Image (tube, rainbow, N blue to C red):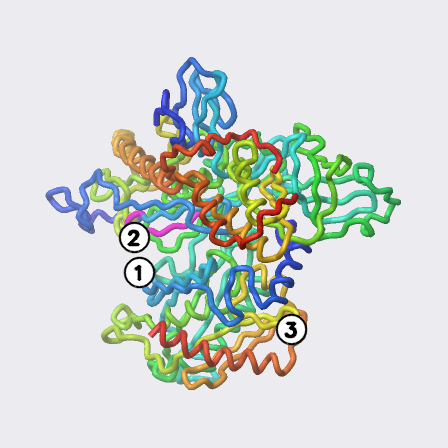
Amino acid sequence: MARSIMSEIKKDHIHKLLAKGKRVDGRAWDEFRPISIQTNFSETAEGSARVKLGNTDVLVGVKMSIGTPFEDTPNKGVLSTNAELIPLASPTFESGPPDENSVELARVVDRGIRESQMVDLEAMCIEPKKEVWMIFTDIYVLDYDGNLFDAAFLGAMAALRSTIVPAKLHEKGEDYALPIRHFPISVTAVQIENSILVDPTLDEEKVAAARLTVTTDENGDLRAMQKGGQGALTMEQIYKVIETSQRLGADLRNTIG
Amino acid sequence: MNKEGSSSREIVLPGDLLDSGKLKAGAGTYVQEGKVYAAQLGIMSVKSNFVNVIPLGGRYIPAPGDSVIGKVIDIGPSNWLIDINSPYPAPLHVNEVPWRVDFGDTARFMNVGDTLLAKVLMVDETMRVQVTMKEQGLRKLQGGQVMEISYSKVPRVIGKGGSMIQMIKNMTNTRIFVGQNGRIWLDGEIENIVFAIRAIKMIEENAHTSRLTERIKEYLDSVSKPGQAETSG
Amino acid sequence: MGGNSNVKLIDDNGIRIDGRKVDQLRDLKIEAGVLKRADGSAYVELGKNKVLAAVYGPRECHPRHMQNPAKAIVQCKYNMIAFSVGDRKRPGPDRRSVEISKIISEALEYVVFTENFPRTSIDVYIEVLQANAGTRCAGLTAASVALADAGIPMKDLVPSVAVGKVNDQVVLDLQKEEDNYGQADVPIAMIPRTGEVLLLQMDGHLTRAEFGRAMELAQPALMQIYAAQKDALTRRYALEPSDDPEDQATSEPQEG
């Protein structure tokens, strides 16, 4: 598609700036774009958040209902994450069922939520083997300018942390806040000509050889990782991204509160 | 909304009544029952008895003679397909380039992702567009940086008699070519390119605010280094 | 339509459950140009409805077999996101969305000067972020603003509103409970200046006189929505007065 072919001149310009340690928008290699998080955007969702990361704009909603647990986890609630790259967000997104990019995005966000055990799924059990709370997290990209992983993860985090379990509606007692035990944060970086750049813009993603997302918890421990792209990363680069994710994760946790 | 007799610099919206009888319908307007209405969001302008709407947005629609900056998006054995930032990609035939290209040899001269300076040769009624590189000055572009602005802001970036773009070129010591299709190519030292891009973006974002020329000049003064007065390009 | 006249939706003073009078529109807010990637966009809040619309185009028509050599085609896709409603909606188009997409595409095709852009497609996306009845009307209202924001030539903006009947009374702009328990629902879209109707549906039970009354209620509401559409665009593109001679630069550029 015409719009997804990047001109050689633009690619070279990014490389030339990088050779001088600079980025097109003037950021440092480990700097995030301005972030804004607005919770409770939706009245129909049990929890919701709209996140803007630079020009990337993502809306996340959490819906809860009662259902039957999986056979192998009869006393745990069910967590499910879905992501949609809807066509209004970019000329390159098409209508239709989730493609491989939507699926990867949903599964990486899901992994961060699930492996950090931020939601106490055992507390979401109403009657073992019979009734548990189902938690659906739906991610919608509204405007695409790179780094959907971090924008979506921040959105999912903020939405879950503001979710109220609709117990009253389902006659299971009084409403209460979804019990959250941990505070994972994901940080994504790309590798361009052996430079590591955090929070890539769309153009930086297009030029990047590889991408690495590292999700850490409040203790700095690793909860999820995902390498993407057709290039390679050295172990040294991987450690650099891990350290940066731990450091920036801590900063973000302080800012978000 | 009735905009008859208004002075320019007022926004008009589709459906606004511009004139009921004296003026003729120009660009961006339509006629219904003898009255002229705005068809596009833009600025009303009256010239030589025509009432026009100068659009504030929208896609670039190619016209013969336009100088454009294109990007190669596909190659065939005897042509390239050029994206000119318009709903209509334009084929460039081997007969319309300054080189002698054998059948099947097109990729040797220009490849997908290359940027070029071209002219719109012709546009037919179904909007099939053809471009050429066969004129003086048209060529493949290399180095520098390419940016895109809304094509409707091109006149503002160029300025009256080219004064605005000349000021930017002089004060940043860069070569700049502004395509009619809203694509701009800049070349020079990389820091200077970054300043020039910033200045152009400022124009695009503030195209119709007051004191724009002054503000651009202030910005360029603040970033230019002494001894930068050499002009080129 | 519930059709259940037992649920009391209007009190004896003619006040509805959300405090409105029978001829009162819900709170309306419209913003133009809210997205960066899209060629044009708009956001509408009508009561508790939250609707986002974006336009891409004119652009190359895909699928290619749908190209029209004489004009652009307008393809609108209306969608409700999973958490736009109380019971989570499974993602993906359902038959209702397909129908609504079609009728909105047809309404927009009438106003856009499609002959200017042969062989292209003008793609309009409507996403309902939060629903509370009347979403197709809010969607068309937003889509119309998004088209103008995208600089697409069109005859006029198109406001849209729904009128209905509850407790045997014709009322303007049904909200969710009124739609669920009401007796009729009539979404309509019209070009105010010419009176041309571009979208009209009806379900329920209305006498011809009741339909006439519904149209009487719709007219001023459509004017109100139309004014809000214009205001959103005017605010987005507000010009400052300028004495800078540079601003006289017209669309006759010289080469840079």
Mark 3 or 2, closer to the camera: 3
Crowdedness near tag 1: few (<14), some (14–19) or many (≥20) residues, C-alpha within 10 Å: some
Mark 1 / mark 3, whichever is N-terminal: 1
Does label 2 lie on the same chain as label 3? Answer: no
Crowdedness near tag 2: few (<14), some (14–19) or many (≥20) residues, C-alpha within 10 Å: some
- Residue with the mark numbered 1: A43
- Percent position of residue B169, x then y: 58, 45
Q: Amino acid at mark 2?
A: Lys
Q: Which residues are magenta?
A: C46-53
- Percent position of residue B51, x then y: 46, 21
Above or below for C199 versus A3: above
Asked if the residue at tag 1 contacts the one at tag 2, i.e. Cβ–Cβ closer than 8 Å, the answer is yes
| Local secondary structure at mark 2 | loop
Does label 1 lie on the same chain as label 2? Answer: no
Q: Residue furthest left?
A: C13
Taking the image as shown, residue B30 lies to the left or right of residue B124, namely left
